[in-house]
Amino acid sequence: MFAALGDETRLALLGRLYGGERMSITELSVGARMTRQAVSKHLRVLERARLVHASREGRESLYAFDPAPVEEMRVYLEGVSAQWDGVLGRLKAFVEGSV
Amino acid sequence: MFAALGDETRLALLGRLYGGERMSITELSVGARMTRQAVSKHLRVLERARLVHASREGRESLYAFDPAPVEEMRVYLEGVSAQWDGVLGRLKAFVEGSV
DNA sequence: GAAACGAGCAACTAAAAGGTTGCCTATCAG
DNA sequence: CTGATAGGCAACCTTTTAGTTGCTCGTTTC
C-alpha cells in the first residue's frame, strides 16, 4: 500500500476520485499528461492495493475510491505512535535511572 | 515519504530502529541479506524522508528512528477519513434526494 | 605506527517501474 | 450495418531503483 501511494501520478488520481464520484478511465486520463493506458496501469496498481475498485458498466469501467485501507492505516499508525511513546518513556526512565 | 516506506527492506530497517536503540550501519547490516553499502543507501532514503536521522560518533554513524513524520501522517489521515465521511454523507443525501 | 574496523564514494550491473505504440474486441449511436 | 467510443493486451523503450564491487579515508586499538 505504501508503494502504491508512493507515486505522484497515483496520488493525483486518488485525489480526483476522492470527491466520491465514480470516473471512467478516459475521464481520468483527461487532465493527465500521459496516455490512457498509463492511467489504466496506475489504476490497477491502486486496485491491487485496494485503494480503489472498478465496476464495469456497459463499455466503460468506473473507478471509485475505497476508504477502508486508509482507515486501517490510520488505526495502525495510531498504534505505532502509542507504542513509540511507550518506548520513549522507558528510555527516559532508563537514562534517568542510570545517572 | 510513502515512497520511502514502500520498500520491504526499508520497513525492516525501521522495524529494527523502532525499539528506540541507536544503531550503526554495520550493526543494521548484520541480519540483512545484502551488503553494508546497500543498507547505507536505504538509510539515506529514510533520512531524506525524515523517518530517521544519523549522528556521527567517532568512526561510526548511529541511526535513530524519528517519529515526527509518522505522527504527521497519522494526523493527516485523520483529516482524510473525516472528510471522506462528509463526502459519503453528502452523496447519500444527494441520492436520496433524487429518488 | 601498523593492523583492523566503520564508513563514504564512484562505477557498474540487473531488474523493475513508468510510459508509449499498435492492434483487437466490445458496446453504443446514428 | 457502420462508425465512433471505451477499454484490454502485448511488445517495446527508457529511466529509476536496488544491489554489488573495489578503492580510499578517518578512527580505534594494540
Image (cartoon, coloured by chain):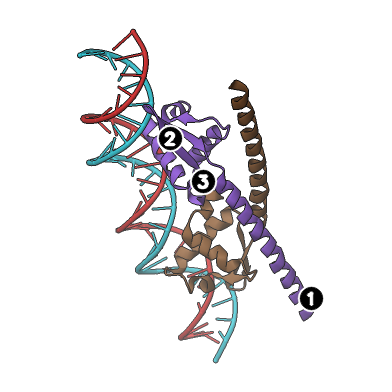
Chain colours: A purple, B brown, C red, D cyan
**What residue is rendered at 63% in x and 41% in y?**
B80
Q: Earlier in the sequence, mark 2 or mark 3?
A: 3
User: Answer yes or no: do the residues labelled 2 and 1 have beta carbons within 8 Å?
Assistant: no
Residue A15: x and y, percent? 55, 35
Residue labelled with disc 3: A5
Q: Is residue B20 left or right of D1 when viewed as pictured?
A: right
Image position of A19 with respect to D19: above or below: above
Residue labelled with disc 2: A55
Which of D8 and B62 lies nearest the eye of the viewer?
D8
Disc 1: CA contacts within 10 A as few (<14), some (14-19) or many (>=20): few
Q: CA distance from mark 2 to mark 3?
A: 21 Å
Tell me the number on the disc at residue B64. Answer: none
Disc 3: CA contacts within 10 A as few (<14), some (14-19) or many (>=20): many
Dot 2 falls on a residue whose secondary structure is: strand
Residue labelled with disc 1: A96
Q: CA distance from mark 2 to mark 1?
A: 59 Å
Dot 3 falls on a residue whose secondary structure is: helix
Residue D19: x and y, percent? 40, 63
